[in-house]
Amino acid sequence: MNATEQLENAHLLVIQTVDNLPESEWERPMSKDGWTVKDSIAHLISYERVLVDILNTLLGDVPATPYLSQFTASQDNFNAEQVAARSNHTAQQVIDEYEEVQATSTALLTRIPAATLEQYSSFPWFGEKRPLNTILDRLIRHVKLHCDEVTAFRTHEKL
């Protein structure tokens, strides 16, 4: 399976994980940290936006990388600020934004040659050389982790 298919499968997992979740349940805390399903999806949106910035940088399409810049400045602040930025959004607005950004990231990824995904590149924001497919693998594992949390919440709450 190629990188684009893996990313699309991760996106599909998110959509399937929240499918038919009543809107009222998007705002209930899932765990001791107080995060809700909406917070978790908002968090995934922000990481997907970082990926869009990375891909645009590699393609030379965009000189500014607002999400990537904020992420590299302080990951803890980035998470809190990105989740807070969507706190007044409805569940539908959050899922719509997720679907929009995932379509963008997938479209950009299709423009990256497969060989480039395996080349070690210098990503100054990560402080070391690594292949892009390593970054994609981490993002996909991250998506699966949050989907597992939402699934556990739904199972526990019988939603």
Image (spheres, grey):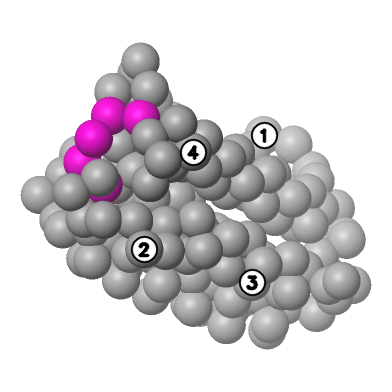
Point 21% across, 55% down: residue? 23
Task: Using the image, tell me which numbered label, if any, was put on residue 155.
Answer: 4
Q: CA distance from mark 4 to mark 3?
A: 24 Å
Instruction: Report the front residue among 98 and 118.
Output: 98
Of the residues shown, which amino acid type is indicated by label 1? Gly
Crowding around mark 3 (Cα neighbors within 10 Å: few <14, some 14 to 19, many 20+) is some
Cα distance, mark 4 to mark 2?
A: 13 Å
Secondary structure at badge 2 equals loop
CA gap, disc 1 and disc 4: 40 Å
Residue type, mark 4 in image: Thr
Q: Which residue is mark 2?
A: 20
Does 8 appear in magenta?
no
Q: From the viewer's perspective, is the residue at label 1 or at label 3 nearer?
A: 3
Which residue corresponds to mark 1?
127
Measured in 3D between alpha carbons, the distance from the residue under mark 1 to the one under mark 3, in whole angstroms, is 28 Å
The numbered disc on residue 112 is none
Task: Indicate the quadrant where residue 112 lies.
Answer: bottom right
Q: Which residues are magenta?
A: 26-30
User: Which of pointers 4 and 3 indicates the residue nearer the eye?
Assistant: 4
Q: Earlier in the sequence, mark 4 or mark 2?
A: 2
